[in-house]
Image: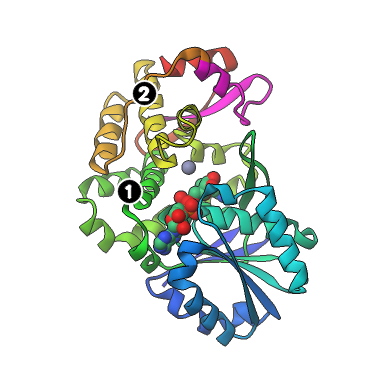
Amino acid sequence: MKELICTTSNTHQYPIMIEKGLKSRLSQMKALFSQYHKVMIITDKNVAKEYLTEVERQVRMSGPKVYNIVVPPGEKSKCLDQASSIYNELVKCNITRSDAILTLGGGVVGDLGGFCAATYLRGIDLIQLPTSLLAQVDSSVGGKVGIDLDYGKNLVGAFHQPKAVIIDPLFLETLEDHYMIDGMAEVIKYGCISSANLFVKLMGYTYHEDLIEDIEEIIARCCQIKRDIVEEDEHEHGIRRTLNFGHTIGHVVETFYKFKKYSHGEAVAIGMAQITKKTVAEGISQADTYRNIVEILNAYGLPSKLPNMPLDKVQEILFTDKKFENEALHICALEKIGKAEIVKIQKQQAIELFK
Ligand code: NAD
Ligand code: ZN
């Protein structure tokens, strides 16, 4: 088993455990689970169908009483109404501060369940059991939890580090292919911002056979990169911003098409390619960086070309980006593959990125 320890600024420490088959060995994690009287599992319908019975049984065997809440799948569940019904259920089951929430699912369940854990009774313990590739390499690590408002995604949230992250790559056996590809966009992102080695390795795989062979190692590498970044900058004042590589442009693409035409991973892929096209042209990035990014994205079935969007509409969306601070935006650009830097641009300059 690969085990990484994540230490955050308030000296909170938690393990990130990664191994095929961990979901069938939860009952052996007595030191973790037996500290709780009750564990509330929060999951969604798709994941519940495949895994809830087994996970419930395993956790129960390790000590605590186990309850569950199953929400509908999809981003629409990441809302205040859903959080509110979860709070009510937590009260009904008499969940106290010595109990824990365990999130079993993708990033939606992790963010929603994590948000409830951060806020219910001013915070109770959270254990993340991520089941999608995106959740295993990204959202389950780092403590960001939250929900969406009608005005935009992730507008309400908290930093609430988990007590443990338990990653079983075997969950991915039932994940639909397009969600797998979505997660790959974030994996490629880690290569771009932090590891030329990982990038080159990913270039060498044929999707999807030999990639799956190595998936445990790849997930561990991504978690390690994210762990290192989060340890250095938990609250995103500096280096954590590099995790947003491709996301500023991606956010505009997703929003322009009302979250229907492009998935998050596809939009981020377009964003990574487009920003690099611009920074190569300006001499910020090494000349071959753009070509390499386009090549790897296309090899994994991800798009790289910015769609035609009217600039007035782009501006309207861009200016509502919550990451604007005092009329300026911090964006992540690559010096070369594996080395990122943060560039501060003024509001009016940002529109140039879309030309
Ligand atoms: P998701 O949770 O909606 O999962 C995608 C789909 O796959 C869902 O239909 C789900 O039911 C299904 N699924 C998940 N695991 C499965 C499995 N093992 N087998 C079968 N089906 C499975 O979406 P996601 O892509 O995992 O996460 C996206 C969310 O993550 C977004 O809301 C985004 O804002 C959030 N996010 C958060 C962070 C963070 O740091 N907190 C980082 C990145 C993304
Ligand atoms: Zn992302």
Task: State the mark number for residue 307.
Answer: 2
Query: Considering depth in this image, is 343 or 146 the residue closer to the camera?
Result: 146
Q: For the point 62% across and 21% down, which residue is it?
A: 328
Amino acid type of the residue that numbered disc 1 sits on in the rendered structure: Leu
Camera-near label (2 vs 1) is 2
Residue at image coords 54%, 17%: 315
In the image, 259 versus 122, the foreground residue is 259
Badge 2 vs badge 1, beta-carbon distance below 8 Å: no
The residue labelled by disc 1 is 198
Q: Which residues are magenta?
A: 313-334
**Secondary structure beneath disc 2?**
loop
Quadrant, the N terminus: bottom left
55, 298: nearer the viewer: 55
Examine the rendering and report whether any part of residue 227 can be seen. Answer: no
Numbered mark located on residue 176 in the image: none
Circle 1 residues within 10 Å: few <14, some 14–19, many ≥20: many
Rendered position, 152 above or below 280: below
Q: Quadrant of residue 353?
A: top left
| Vertical position of residue 132 compared to residue 253: above or below | below
x, y percent for residue 229: 53, 47
